[in-house]
Amino acid sequence: MERIFCDLRRCLACGACELACAVEHSSSKDLFRAVLEGEAPVGRREVQAAPFGSVSLNISLACHHCDPAPCVDACITGAMHHEDGVVLVDQERCVGCWMCVMACPFGAITPSKLKVALKCDLCPDREGKAGRARYACVEACPTEALFAGEFVEFKRLLEEEVVPY
Amino acid sequence: MKNIIIGSSAAGISAAEALRRADPTCEIVMISDEPNPLYSRPLISYYLAGELPEERIYYRPPDFYERNRIEARLGRRAVRVEPRANRVILDNGEELEYDNLLLATGAVPVFPEIEGLEKRGVFGFRTLKDAKEMLRLLPEVKEAVVLGGGLVGLKAAVGLRARGVEVTVAVGSPHLLSQMIDARASEIYGELLEAHGIKVATGMEPAKILGDSQVTGVLMRSGEELPCQLVVVGKGVRANLEPVEGTEVRYDYGIIIDEHCRTNIPNIYAAGDVAQSYDVVRGEHWTNALWPCAVEQGRVAGLNMAAKEAVYRGSIGMNSVQLFDLPVISAGLAGLRERDFDEELIVQPAPRVYKRLVLRGDRVVGFILVGEIENAGLIRSLVAKGVSVAGLKDQLLRESFGFSEVLPLIEGRSERFPEREYQELIETMRLVS
Ligand SMILES: Cc1cc2nc3c(=O)[nH]c(=O)nc-3n(C[C@H](O)[C@H](O)[C@H](O)COP(=O)(O)OP(=O)(O)OC[C@H]3O[C@@H](n4cnc5c(N)ncnc54)[C@H](O)[C@@H]3O)c2cc1C
């Protein structure tokens, strides 16, 4: 199954992925309009500093779409569910009990003020630019730190040297 | 293979689904004494409050049994298991034989030994039927008393308050939610409930339910009388052991299960509120009567029943709730009476934000997060994995604390993190270094 991975060597913590994610999940899917409409778009991805021996690298993190998924086990309504390997929240059914927030070991679920759980849904309503991964975060990453694909392919990428542009 | 599952709620449903996925052809029979067991039990308080209509509290669609090719015996109670004969006896005398049996009979409310419990208007709060009967009585109810300040009692109180009832919560112990949080966190909730019109009376045990056939009040041991037309008993639950009582199946407070969710009888499994599994913080078997544990244990039991090896790594106590607008999550040794720790760290950056971390040596063994809950899952996983957090303990309660900061710890103890998602991160870390 295709998932999104982050190459820590390339991530500059610019935050472009966070912003693109937030915009993609706003009602208008447009940054200016979202801000004008008074909506503060909430992202489902976060860039964090990762301590690495004496240095610090950056990593862009979101839901891992675990299988089995602790958040799905914990959900008392059935809102959190698996669909073809993707872990999704049915926002209509979510009651905001935050059992999923308690369960997720990665802290990848945001308890929103609207009492629904928010998390990476792998951009279901997005086509993406031709020839590129269709995910907002991957497309927005200026250094190609985010990679969409199988983990084995991602590992091959990690085995290559990073050459600065 | 013929599999029988007694109980068709969180644990039973999860087991049946895992079993069906792993073995498309086996026979599955589910027995439930509830006629409509596919609803989510924790949602009955939302239904009581009027926040969710009945059709929204169902956890699985009505064709669940057909779709999974399950023979459902609804409205039937299993009264006895005969492990030597591999047989279950139903309340109508019918005898069913099995190759594998799962006990997923859950728990029932505990009622105190006081007079008057049989009167009209006294309820446990466990089933959809309880909630419906409470709603039916509502036109006659001006005041209600909830006995017990645990999570279930408080949810009932909030639900009744939402319906305009004047509610008093009478708590035996000196604090609300004493199993889940400490005294300071409990004070925050006491104030919150009072602000929403729910009275809280602590140190109050009931002596007698008053009234003729209909409840008119509760006499407390203190001599005080609380007038009411409805009583909810929220004094905890006990495992539903009836079908195995007096049999060879080993039980204590619950049925003892091993890491395959198997009982001492090789073809009998147990899962959910009825089971007592290894608690990784306490280091002994313990009942953690929780939805997530029921689902996970059910899945592990179901897979093993299908002869697919699956391991249950043990449970910890935990819970999450949002009462009104204030969320709290706690796990491990978090309750009022837990004393088996060496060190506690507390921060209270705002009046309604309270965070407490409890450590034994350099392991986190419990926490409470009130108001700011974002990192609950991350800290919970450190409790469950039992790894040393020596260098990190002062950072765990910071708002900015994030998963990336535990990456080195995970890499250093990779054997404790066998799940695919962690292993991918560990490999990533090793390849980029
Ligand atoms: C109001 C309320 C709120 C809750 N909120 C939360 C929450 O927020 N988070 C959380 O983690 N947990 C919560 N819980 C607890 C949670 O509901 C339980 O942990 C969970 O339902 C356990 O599932 P189970 O399948 O083990 O047992 P149960 O849900 O108890 O189901 C057992 C089923 O078996 C049936 N049965 C029993 N004996 C027999 C028999 N002999 N023959 C046939 N059928 C039988 C019962 O009638 C029942 O249908 C809440 C509970 C309540 C009541």
Image: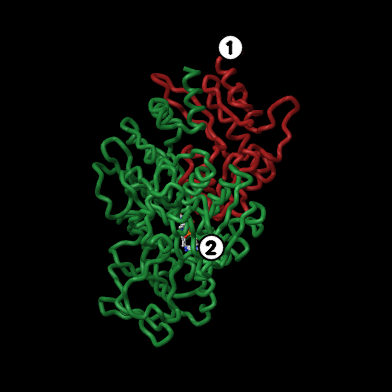
Name which residue lies at 56% across and 68% down. Answer: B75
Q: Return the residue nearer the eye: B362 or A152.
A: A152
Inspect this view and state whether residue B327 appears.
no
Residue B217's x, y, as percent?
37, 81
**Label 2 is placed on what type of residue?**
Ser
Along the horizontal axis of the image, is B94 left or right of A92?
left
- The residue beneath circle 1 is A163
SS under mark 2: strand
Element type at mark 1: loop
Are discs 2 and 1 less than 8 Å apart at CB? no
- Crowd around label 2: few <14 · some 14–19 · many ≥20 (10 Å): many
Chain A colour in the picture: red
Mark 1 neighbour class, 10 Å CA radius: few under 14, some 14 to 19, many 20 or more? few
User: Label 2 is found on which chain of the structure?
Assistant: B
Residue B426 seen in the figure: yes
State the image coordinates of residue B158 (x, y, percent, origin top left).
46, 66
Q: CA distance from mark 2 to mark 1?
A: 63 Å
Q: Which residue is mark 2?
A: B32
Could you say where residue A28 lies in the image, as x and y percent from the top left? Answer: 69, 44
Mark 1: C-beta under 8 Å from nearest atom of ligand 1: no
| Disc 2 residue lies near ligand 1 with CB under 8 A | yes
Q: Which mark is residue B433?
A: none
Q: Output the chain of dot 1.
A: A
Residue most extreme to the bottom: B212
Viewer-proximal residue, B93 or B161? B93
Q: Residue at x 46, y 65 (%)?
A: B79
- Can you tell which chain is drawn green? B
